[in-house]
Image (cartoon, grey):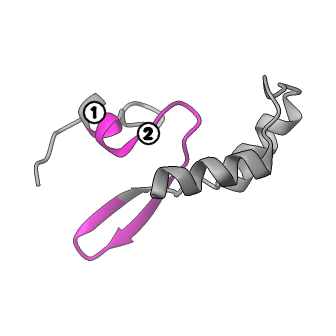
Amino acid sequence: MFAKERKVGPKGQVVIPKDFRKEMGIRPGSKVEFEYTDEGIVIRKEDENTEKVFEEVAKSGKQVSRKIDAHESYESELEERN
C-alpha cells in the first residue's frame, strides 16, 4: 500500500492521483463513496451497475450490427467445448 499527499483546494476539493484513478478504474462520471473511520477517510469506488449501463446503451438508440441466431450460437459453443 502506498500514499500520496495532495493539497485541498478552496472548495474542499482534492484531486485523486492519476495512478490511483487508473488502478481503480475511476473515470469522469464514476461515483465514489466516502467513509469516515477511526483511521481517517476512506474513499471507495462504487461498483458499476451493469443493468444501468445496458439501459443507457439501449436508450442511446445504437443498433446491434448483426442478428445473433441463438441456435447457431449454442451449436458453436458446443463445438468449441468438444
Extreme-left residue of the structure:
2
Residue, disc 2:
26
Of the pair 33 and 12, the residue shown nearer to us: 33
Q: Is residue 21 left or right of residue 52?
A: left
Is the C terminus in the top left, top right, bottom left or bottom right quadrant?
A: bottom left
- Cα–Cα span, label 2 and label 1: 10 Å
Q: Is residue 74 depicted above or below 60 in this figure?
A: below
**Residue 50's spot in the image, x, y percent?**
65, 53
Q: Find the magenta span and give its range.
A: 20-42
**Residue 34's spot in the image, x, y percent?**
45, 59
Q: Is residue 50 left or right of residue 82?
A: right
Q: Is residue 39 depicted above or below 81 in this figure?
A: below
Q: Quadrant of residue 42?
A: bottom left
Q: Is residue 26 depicted above or below 45 in this figure?
A: above
Task: Give the secondary structure at mark 1.
Answer: loop
Task: Give the secondary structure at mark 2.
Answer: loop
Q: Which mark is residue 17?
A: 1
Is the N terminus in the top left, top right, bottom left or bottom right quadrant?
A: bottom left
Type of residue at label 1?
A: Pro
Q: Is residue 72 magenta?
A: no
Of the pair 14 and 20, the residue shown nearer to us: 20
**Residue 7's spot in the image, x, y percent?**
26, 33
Q: Quadrant of residue 26?
A: top left
Please tell me which residue is depicted at 35% across the width and 45% down the height of the picture.
Answer: 24
